[in-house]
Amino acid sequence: MSRTGSHGRRGLAVALRGITKSFPGVLANDHVDLEVRWGEIHALLGENGAGKSTLMSILSGLYQPDEGEILVGDDEGGLRPVTITSPRAAIHLGIGMVHQHFKLVPTQTVAENVILGVEDMPFVLDLDAVARDVAEIADRLRMPVDPTAPIWQLSVGEQQRVEILKALYRGAEILVLDEPTAVLTPQEADEVAAILRSLAAEGKAIVFISHKLDEVVEIADRVTVLRKGRNVATMDVADTDKHRLAELMVGREVATTIPKPPAEPGPTVLALEGVVVRNERGLVALDHVDLEVAAGEILGIAGVAGNGQRELTEVATGLRRPDAGRVVVDGKDLTGASPVAFLDRGVAHVPADRLGRGLAGNLPLADNLAMRAYRHPPIAVGPAIRRDRMRAFAETIIERFRVDAPGPDTPARNLSGGNQQKAILGREITAGSWAAARGHRPVLVAAYPTRGLDVGAIEHVRARLLEQRAAGTAVLLVSEELDELLMMSDRIAVLHGGRIMGVVTPEETTIEELGLMMAGEAHR
């Protein structure tokens, strides 16, 4: 297909008919039908495990279906059945996928990244000509990017443009995007939306997976909802709203907003005073950060990923020692203390990486839920651990926090992302209540607690966080979802380049103002 796009096409770009795909013990896609038209933006919604990624992996050649067929359209409106055995075969058919986690080589230029893997390039490359071609595509679609710039010099939003350019340069006419705005500022997300509209106006077919219902309603022309591997609805976006979409995804009515009574903050429980942290490369990740979190309040942390959020949560939980400054928890200076000292003082931690840092995936759920409790009665009896009491303790958390698991002996890796998050929250909140019983004011540091979750799991997690706020816990909430921060937080601090650009209240700010601070403009 042409690298310059086609206009005026009508009919279907691609049709999936009766697609079925099974994995051991899981029916991921159950006779799914999906039709995408030329010139439209088609959103794909569903809970975690609903089959969205599997379906798009089949379309992009990563998986082959057990049953069903794929048909690809042409410029004249006809359809022909195809077999897509690999991503290379998919791109030959004009199907390109932009993954949520970028596949770029940081040390190479934009132009070099764009041509990586292109089959018809000459043995001796003319990078100047490639750069001109890339610049022409970028200019036409109004997504400026310097073809000669190394990737490491680009913002996250610019890197997203490069991923889209890669697919277009290879001739993609059917473009699949997985969570394309997940790590972007609001302004960058608006730019991506404009790019997608331009591509659709050129006649290309766009499919995008998103967990953001507001985004779907704003950007998409049509939407398909998957639930438990089946297509439960395909409709024009103009004929629905986000509340109806959430209900279709989960199969019940879901609260997309949560009532939040006025905060009654108490004394400061967690304080960072002039904290400086250098990362593993020796660069300043936190630059003289001052923050306070009071009992009974949620302090939200906004910022584009990679601006010091990880280092902030690690300092606040004792996992990283600051190079300068102090960390004070409930009146006690814990600067440089061990993580165990932070735990014993009442600091609970929901890490960003659920399986990498939050859970030991191969261990039973009971062992994971006891990680904060195994040193204390009733589980510990002297130096020994009573496994029967550990199982009973785990069963209590499973029931209280509605963790959908066959039982406490289930390996943690076998749970869905939402249930893994519920398990971690249950463990950490329980530990916080024990700290309160010992006379400490608890702190809960939650990093991206709803990232990648479906609307039902998000509803549960947010409700638990507000319960902790009401119980007097000091909550530090790190999130990339600005709507979530505005809904949940009592105050919002914005990080950029390791510095605090400003601390604002949700009632006195807007998403646009937060976006400007995320881009480096100090609050006035």
Image (cartoon, rainbow, N blue to C red):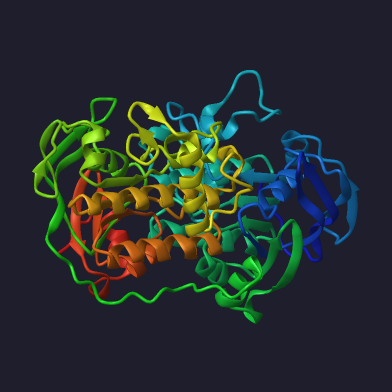
Whether residue 61 is visible, yes or no, is yes
Quarter that holds the C terminus = bottom left
Whether residue 520 is visible, yes or no, is no
Q: Is residue 351 left or right of residue 341?
A: right
| Outermost residue to the bottom | 239
> In the figure, 211 relative to 60: above or below?
below
Is residue 485 or residue 111 the one in the foreground? 485
Is residue 384 or residue 502 the one in the foreground? 384
Q: Is residue 409 left or right of residue 522?
A: right
Q: Quadrant of residue 38?
A: bottom right
Give how far across and how far down residue 217 sits, in percent: 56, 72
Quarter that holds the N terminus = top right
**Residue at the (59%, 75%) spot, across then down:** 253
Total marks shown come to 0
**Residue at the (61%, 77%) spot, across then down:** 244
Give how far across and how far down residue 174 sits, in percent: 71, 52
**Residue at the (26%, 40%) spot, across then down:** 343
**Residue at the (33%, 48%) spot, across then down:** 431
Q: Is residue 78 left or right of residue 310?
A: right
Give how far across and how far down residue 366 sits, in percent: 51, 40
